[in-house]
Image: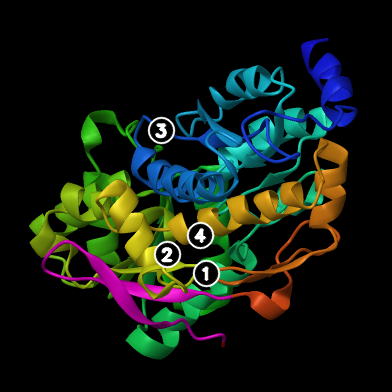
Amino acid sequence: MLVAGAAACNSTSKDNNSSSGGKNCGYKLAYFGALTGSSANLGVNIEQGAELAVVQYNAKNGANCITIQKFDSQGDPAVAPGVARQLVTDTKIIGIIGPPFSGESEAANPIFDQAGIPLITPSATRVSLDSHGWKVFHRAVANDGAQGPAAANYIKNVLKAQKVFVADDQSAYGAGLADQVKQTLGGLVAGTDKTSADGKQPGNDFSGLVQKVVASGATAFFYGGYYQNAGLIRKQLTAAGWTGTQLGGDGVNDPGFATAAGNAAAAGSIVTCPCSPASKAGGTFVADYKKQWNVDAGTYSDVAFDAANIFLKGIDAGNTTTQKLNDYLKTQQYEGVANTYKFTDNGELDPTYIKVWAFKFGTDGKAVPDQEAPKS
């Protein structure tokens, strides 16, 4: 009943004049995603990118013209539905940046869809997210149908590995990405395995996986999952004397990987991202982000900034109900700092604008752009 009531109220809300600025002030955007928990680093990158866009908008349109409300899902599919139900009770919220992760998207997006609140995820990449018929779903990056093959092509054509071991954390994201990698690698796959999710592996002990990787003779190891597990696995592989190259997807593209592995063990590891390097974002974004938050922009910070600005442009044009804003997203082509955005009928990023980059960790624990990943 709570969700149904919120849906009716959200979808029919009237334009709300506010004393804080122009005629289209008084509305809220929401960030929904991890702010605490094992995946918090990636979530904070995204929240800060979105919040920067709102700060800049309000500097031009009046203090608190648009507010951004934060909802901490911890990136956990078990936690996400309850937090989503809280979000949809606030009828001032007319757009959502998030969820960042695929598992929580599977759990929370049906609630957002029923409430009719449009969302733009800057980072949830599981292919099947576009198959549920969610009318409010929009994805600002390529899905794993592009990222997985790109990572596999990097392994084949750049590393030229002849034996590759592939493992995943059994999450919606990790398993889906690993499956795409395995399909593209075909006969190069020398072995596979599963782990528990980040923070849930008993004793953080990956010795069974490590033994399998070493015994397989693989010179490359791809892990579908997130940075905490990936870093611990790299640390334990190094301790076992394995000197091959570890790879992962965008869930590993975080300084937390090197923190968990140790900088020396992390060095040389490759991570992919269906995004361009944040350091190459256009305009004044890089300097503005550093000034606002006193840290460099991280993975998906620039995409989240763009996602928030797409919403803000729509609100500025008078699309101040959830239905109007959702309809607006279907018609727009937006030139952002990270990419150009146009959404297909099922909410995917137009294939014309898909990008996948590879990044390499250095001895300082930082991942720097390596090259755009091969498309074949």
Q: Which residue is mark 3?
A: 35
Give me the C-alpha separation between circle 2 and circle 1. 7 Å
Residue 210: image location, x then y, percent: 24, 54
Q: Residues within 10 Å of mark 1 (few under 14, many from 20)?
A: some
Q: Residues within 10 Å of mark 2 (few under 14, many from 20)?
A: many
Q: Note whether 180 is above or below 112 in the view shown.
A: below
Give me the C-alpha separation between circle 4 and circle 1. 30 Å
Question: Considering the numbered disc 4 on the image, is that residue within a helix, a strand or a loop?
Answer: helix
Residue 171: image location, x then y, percent: 51, 42
**Residue 285: numbered disc:** 2
Give the number of the mark in front: 1 or 3: 1
Give me the C-alpha separation between circle 1 and circle 3. 24 Å
Q: Which residue is mark 4?
A: 178
Residue type, label 4 = Ala
Q: Earlier in the sequence, mark 4 or mark 1?
A: 4
Give the number of the mark in front: 3 or 2: 2
Q: Earlier in the sequence, mark 3 or mark 2?
A: 3
- Count of marks placed on residues: 4
Name the quarter where the C terminus is drawn.
Answer: bottom right
**Magenta-tinted stretch:** 355-375
Q: Given the current orientation, which residue lies at the most extreme top position?
A: 1
